[in-house]
Amino acid sequence: NKRTRIKDLLSSSTTGQETIVMGWVRTFRNNQFIALNDGSTNNNLQVVAELGLLDEATLKRITTGASLKVTGTVVPSLGKGQTVELKATTIEVLGDSDAEKYPLQPKKHSLEFLREIAHLRFRTNTFGAVFRIRHALAFAVHKFFNEKGFVYLHTPIITSSDAEGAGEMFRVTTLPFDNPPRKEDGSIDFSEDFFGKSTNLTVSGQLEGELGAMAFSEIYTFGPTFRAENSNTTRHLAEFWMIEPEMAFYDIEDNMNLAEEFIQYLIKYVMEHNADDLAFLDQRLAEEEKQKPQNERQEFGLLEKLKFVVDNQFERITYTEAIQILLDSPHYKKKKFKFDVKWGIDMQSEHERYLVEKHFKKPVIVTGYPAAIKAFYMRLNDGCEPGKETVAAMDILAPGIGEIVGGSQREERLEKLEARMKDMHIPAEEMSWYLDTRRYGTVPHAGFGLGFERMVQFVTGMTNIRDVIAFARTPKNCEF
Ligand code: ATP
Ligand code: MG
Ligand code: MG
Ligand code: MG
C-alpha cells in the first residue's frame, strides 16, 4: 500500500514528489477543489483537479462522503492555513455517496443528531478529534504503567463476584430463559449452567487485581466493565472502560500521589501529542460558550484548564470537611442543591461539582468516607467515634464531571475484613480465594479505578459521556 497519510503529507516540507492519497470527500467546490479527509487529522488535504482533467461523469460522482484514490504531485499551496496541496493527475472514485441522502452535510450538526448516526459520526471534525485523543490516552495509560514497572494483568470479564456490592450486574447464563432448572426452594439451579454457578459481567477487576498485586507487587488492569445502571446521566454508561492499578506496600497517601501523577501524565501526553485536536476542541468549546449568557460561561477555556491541572497540585480534603463546606455554602443556604446534605450521604454529582467548580476551582481529592456508604474491602480507619466509622477511601473529583477516580487502601487485616463482610451479608465461604491473600502473607495495599470515559470527557471537554465512547451502551440503547 503506497498511500501517504494526509497528516504526514500536510506536515511534509518537500514538494514536487508524486504521491497517492485516499480518503473521503468533505467538500467539492467549483468542479476543481476537493477537501479530502482520511481521519488522520482534522485538516483536509486540498486536492486540485485542473479543469479538463475529469470527464463530466466523474465530476458528478465527486460528492460529499464519496471515497477517492488520488494520484498527484505535492505542490506549494497559496491557500490559507496549509503549506502544501495535491495537484491531481488521476482521480478514481472508490465508492459513491448519494449526496441527497448522506446524513453528514458540510455544516455543523448537533451532538444529539450525531448520536443518532453514531455509525457515521467519526467522520466529523469533533469526533475525529475526540477519538484520536481517546486513542492517545489509552496508549499513554500503558506507557505510564510500563515506565513504572507495573504488570498489566487481564482480569476476567465473566466472573462470579460483585466487587462493589451494588447489585448492578448483568447476568451471564446458558440456562434457558423460559424454563430454567429450579432448586426445591424455587430458585434457579445454576449448577446446570455452563459455569455451574451464577455468573455476571464484571463491575470491576479489583478483587482479581488484588490477587495479582499480592505476587507482582504492582499491577494494573484496563478493560471493559459493566453496570446495569438504570440511570440516564451524562456520566454513566452500562459498558465503560476502567483502569485499575493495585499496589502492594502502598498506603492511602501513596495511592493519592500515584493517582494525581497519573492524571497529570495523561493530560501532558495529550497536550504534547494531540495539540491540533486539542486546539480544535478548545475552539469548539469557546464558540459554544459564546452562545451562553455571560453569567453561565465557563471561566476558563479547555486548554487553560488542562494546563492549570498539570501545573497545580490537587486539593486534598476529608469527607467531613467537604460536607462542612457544602453546609456553609451560599448554594446550600439558598436551597440550590436538589439532594440534601448531611454527614453520611453519598455525595451527588451536584455536590462534587460544587466543591470543584465553585469552591476550590481545581480537582479535589476527598478522603475518609463513611464506612456505611463504601464497599466491604476498604480499610477501616482506626479510632473513629462510634457511629461515625470511616474508611481509607479516596475519590478524585474533576470539573465538569465530579467523580473520576474511586480508590482506597484495602483492609489487609483478616479479622476486620471478615467482620465487615459478615455485617454486610457477604458470604465469606464463596470468597475464600480472596481471603487467602489475607491469610498468606498479607500486606498493606491500595488501588483505585479511573473511569476511562470520564477521563476522556475531562480532556476533551465533551459534556456527555455518550460522545466519548464509540458505541454507547445506555438504557434502551443498543442499535449495533
Ligand atoms: P458514581 O458515583 O459516578 O456512580 P461509582 O462511585 O459508582 O461512580 P466506582 O465504583 O467508584 O464508581 O468506580 C470507579 C470509577 O469508575 C468511578 O470513579 C468512575 O470514574 C467510573 N465509573 C463508575 N461507574 C461508571 C459508569 N456507569 N459509567 C462510566 N464510568 C463509571
Ligand atoms: Mg455508581
Ligand atoms: Mg461514587
Ligand atoms: Mg466511587
Image: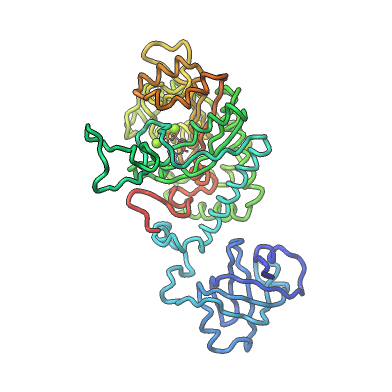
Q: How far from the left and from the top, in percent, is residue 270?
A: 62, 47
83 relative position to 37: left or right: right
**Quarter residue 326 falls in:** top left
Which residue is nearer to you in this view: 216 or 410?
216
Q: How far from the left and from the top, in percent, is residue 231?
A: 34, 43
Q: Which residue lies at the image location 37% right of the left edge and 54% below the top edge?
A: 478
Looking at the image, residue 355 lies above or below residue 267: above
Color theme of the render: rainbow
Ligand 4: image quarter? top left
Q: Which residue lies at the image location 68% right of the left edge and 68% below the top edge?
A: 4
**Quarter residue 191 falls in:** top left
Q: Which residue lies at the image location 58% right of the left edge and 44% below the top edge?
A: 304
Residue 309 visible from this viewpoint:
no
Q: Quadrant of the C terminus?
A: bottom left
Q: How far from the left and from the top, in percent, is residue 25?
A: 55, 72
Looking at the image, residue 59 lies above or below residue 442: below
Which residue is nearer to you in this view: 330 or 276?
276
Which residue is nearer to you in this view: 258 or 35?
258
Residue 123 visible from this viewpoint:
yes
Q: Which residue lies at the image location 39% right of the left edge and 15% below the top edge?
A: 388
Q: Quadrant of the N terminus?
A: bottom right
Looking at the image, residue 48 lies above or below residue 464: below
Which residue is nearer to you in this view: 160 or 355?
160
Q: How far from the left and from the top, in percent, is residue 394?
A: 50, 27
Q: How many marks?
A: 0
